[in-house]
Amino acid sequence: MPLPKAELHLHIEGTLEPELAFELAARNGVELPYADSDELGKAYDFQDLQSFLNLYYELMAVLRTERDFEDLANAYLARAAAQGVRHAEIFFDPQAHIARGIPMGTVVEGLWRALGSSEQNHGVSTRLILCFLRDESAESALETLEAAKPYLDRITGVGLDSAEVGHPPVKFREVYEAAASLGLRRVAHAGEEGPPEYITEALDVLGVERVDHGLRCMESPELVERLVRERIPLTLCPLSNVRLRTVDTLADHPLPAMLDAGLVCTVNSDDPAYFGGYAGDNFDAVRSALGLNEDRLRELARNSFLASFLEDDEERRARYLAEVEAYEFS
Ligand SMILES: [Zn+2]
């Protein structure tokens, strides 16, 4: 039995495996420039951020109907459950779909068809987080939030993702204020490729409660001290960092130093179909490459539930935390 954990940094579009991409392409009559899923699988072995993003956006073309989004989410939830994920807070990128003519309602309702029955079908509780693409304009983000208003009973919070450098958090001040006034929780990618100042800005200007990645906080002792003092969780994605060359090898990952510093770290999969593994694979990878002991692994699992947006269901959080404490490593 795998260690129980919550996954807090997961882009649902990044869970599209080559086999499902081909199945959906066939169902929707979309032509993919690959002979079969094996050839497409080879394209997943990309070499840098740009080739990853090209493939990522190219394959989104196969997602067209509610049923497609439902199938995508169910495939992820089944894989996550098999790796010990008990709770998942799932990002989605509506702008990438709206730009292709797929309405917000198709995306949210399709995902909800899987998420709404995930506990019964997969034993995984869920939350949905709407992400704004930071390389799109602030106006586009505001329009996206507006389009999401009929679906806010399905959406727990907002996030900020895609190309970080050159798109500081402050660009999205207005839409984050609007999201806060709607009662939405707030997270943002910061300090993955961007400087530590972006993390500070995400906290001070956007009011984020959790920082996605946040790796580069380690360049600023003052910032580390603040993140520890305020117990701001960081959602780290070790295999993603290696594939996108944020770190050279897994053995170079700062996770042990971050835990030693007292940071509230969690381990997540980011875009697992593309980055070589799901949540449990990331745990296994850091365990073997970084030699994390059982206390550290348990701490990571505990942090994931403490950092999750379960304030509306503290009984459930307590149950998950008890599972972590009772877990026996094999
Ligand atoms: Zn991410």
Image (cartoon, rainbow, N blue to C red):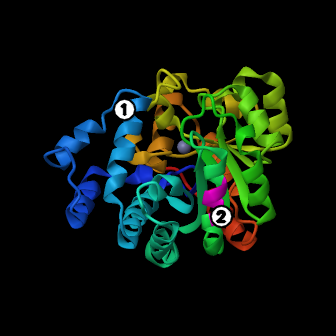
Q: Is residue 306 shown in magenta?
A: no
Residue range in magenta is: 142-146
Mark 1 or mark 2: which is in front? 2
Q: Residue at x 31, y 57 (%)?
A: 62
Q: Residues within 10 Å of mark 2 (few under 14, many from 20)?
A: few
Q: Nearer the viewer, residue 173 or 257?
A: 173
Locate residue 211 relative to residue 67 in the image: left or right: right
| Residue 161 picture location, percent across and down | 58, 44
- Per the rendering, the mark at residue 6 is none
Vertical arrangement, residue 173 with respect to residue 324, above or below: above
Residue sitting at the far front: 139
Q: Main secondary structure of the magenta part?
A: helix
Residue 28 position (above or below residue 289): below
Query: From mark 1 to mark 2, how far is it between C-alphas?
Result: 32 Å
Above or below for 64 versus 203: below
Question: Residue 136 placed where, x, y %?
Answer: 57, 43
Q: Nearer the viewer, residue 136 or 204?
A: 136
The three-letter code of the residue at mark 2 reads Glu
| Residue at numbered disc 2 | 146
Residue under pointer 1: 51
Q: Residue at x 39, y 36 (%)?
A: 52
| Secondary structure at numbered mark 2 | helix
On the picture, is 4 further left or further right than 99?
A: right
> For the residue marked with disc 1, what is the amino acid?
Ser
Q: Residue at x 57, y 39 (%)?
A: 135
Q: Does 125 appear above or below 214?
A: below
Mark 1 or 2, nearer chain start: 1
Q: Residues within 10 Å of mark 1 (few under 14, many from 20)?
A: few
